[in-house]
Image (tube, rainbow, N blue to C red):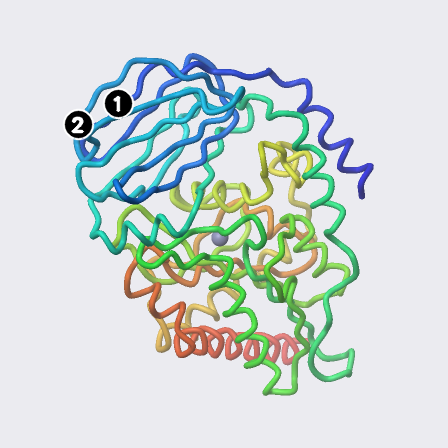
Amino acid sequence: MFCAMLLAVTPILASPVLAGAIQQISAHDGAVIVQFDGVVDKADVFALAGPDRIALDISGATAGRSVALGGAVQNIRQAQFSADTARIVLDLAEPAIVTGGAFSADGKSLRLSLRPAAPKEFSGTVARGKTQIIPPMLFRAEPPKRRYEVTAAIRSNVGTGLPTISGPSDESLPLVVIDAGHGGHDPGAISPHGGQQEKDVTLAIAKSVRDEMLKSGRVRVALTRDTDKFIVLQDRYQLARKLNADLFISIHADSAENPEANGGTVYTLSEVASDREAQRLAARENKANIINGVNLGGADANVSSILIDLTQRETMNVSADFAKLLLREAMPNMRIRGNSHRFASFIVLKAPDTPSVLFETGYLSNAEDVSFLSSREGQRKVARTLANAIQVHFARRIASR
Ligand code: ZN
């Protein structure tokens, strides 16, 4: 495992060295844009209170000069925080929170979306700590070398033993692997309404699904993680394959800039995304493998171009049938979006022989969804939905044999 990691890392060492100098920072209504003259490594965004500020640490960047002001931002300061990190501080005229952030396709500009917020909401984001934004793989400066040691250590923790299988000992009974999305250093989406992290919500739901399914006595269940730990995406489905699972369900909770967006969506694998939103979501979820600019999942450009063979096509059909069933069972229990079965190229769904779905259970950016998904009652409803769909799925498969 350790050697494999070193091999996977080697090509990245050949990529360009830092840094990009900050050329311009502009703040106007609802957005802050930072432009660089070259590629940078990453940005960490965090909020500070009293006076209210938003700070950005951009590693792989050198501080520059030019600024343009507007919106909630009263003043912009920047300085070289350390040898490889420029710090930008936005002094706020009124509390505002960062609702989104992304680098441009060429990695040379960073755009943050801001919206005014109540003081309480602002303190929530202060408590939350840093949010990391990473430029596209091909346009990213090389991070400092010491980080590779961290990467290797994390990687070697993965795959130590297989998860425990709960339920009846009868091995002829179907086995479902529930995957709680994100974990460890990767929090996933973070709610602007109280700082709830996706990794905690998904774990609570996964445990609830396990408990609900065990009541039936007719399925066996394993969780890819039952603690707050990081697992690379490929290892998640590999665990399911090693256990010879009959069904793999990855649980997530999305976040959107539009606070009105709400409800669940079920995704299955396809090399061609059903729509741009599904494509963007897959890109975001697939980024879970990237820490400090190093892709823990290995050669990813290749993963997305793997041709889907015939076995996988059959697996995809079974996955799609399960997705429809899940939506049918969900209707009475929870909010579901229109056009709610979508397709995209999610790494976590790429097991060629295990039917797999990714269930985005709702939006942490939506006030009602986040209170539903973080309540015991809401989690139980999601769990019942999944347990019902799983029972019907296996009953049908046995009947059609
Ligand atoms: Zn997620």
Q: Which amino acid does label 2 sit on?
A: Gly
Residue 254, above or below 300: below
The alpha-carbon separation of the residues under discs 2 and 1 comes to 8 Å
At 47% across and 15% down in the image, what residue appears? 20
If you read the primary sequence from the N terminus, does the residue marked by circle 2 or circle 1 appear first?
A: 1
In the structure shown, which secondary structural element does the residue marked by tag 2 occupy?
loop
Q: Left of 338 or right of it: where is 131? A: right
To which residue does mark 2 refer?
70
Question: Are circles 2 and 1 on residues that touch, CB within 8 Å?
Answer: yes
Residue 343, above or below 149: below
At 20% across and 44% down in the image, what residue appears? 116
Residue 364 % position (x, y):
37, 57
Q: Quadrant of residue 292?
A: top right
At 49% across and 33% down in the image, what residue appears? 134
At 70% across and 66% down in the image, what residue appears? 245
**Crowd band around label 2 with a 10 angstrom C-alpha radius: few (<14), some (14–19), many (20+):** some
Instruction: Name the quarter where the C terminus is drawn.
Output: bottom right
In the structure shown, which secondary structural element does the residue marked by tag 1 occupy?
strand
Residue 345, above or below 208: above
- Farthest front residue? 50
Q: Quadrant of residue 299?
A: top right
Q: Left of 292 or right of it: where is 175? A: right
Instruction: Name the quarter where the N terminus is drawn.
Output: top right
Q: Left of 15 or right of it: where is 359? A: left
Residue 232 % position (x, y):
64, 48
The one nearer the camera, 314 or 134, is: 134
Q: Left of 359 or right of it: where is 114? A: left
Q: What residue type is labelled 1?
A: Ser
To which residue does mark 1 refer?
26
Total of numbered circles in the picture?
2
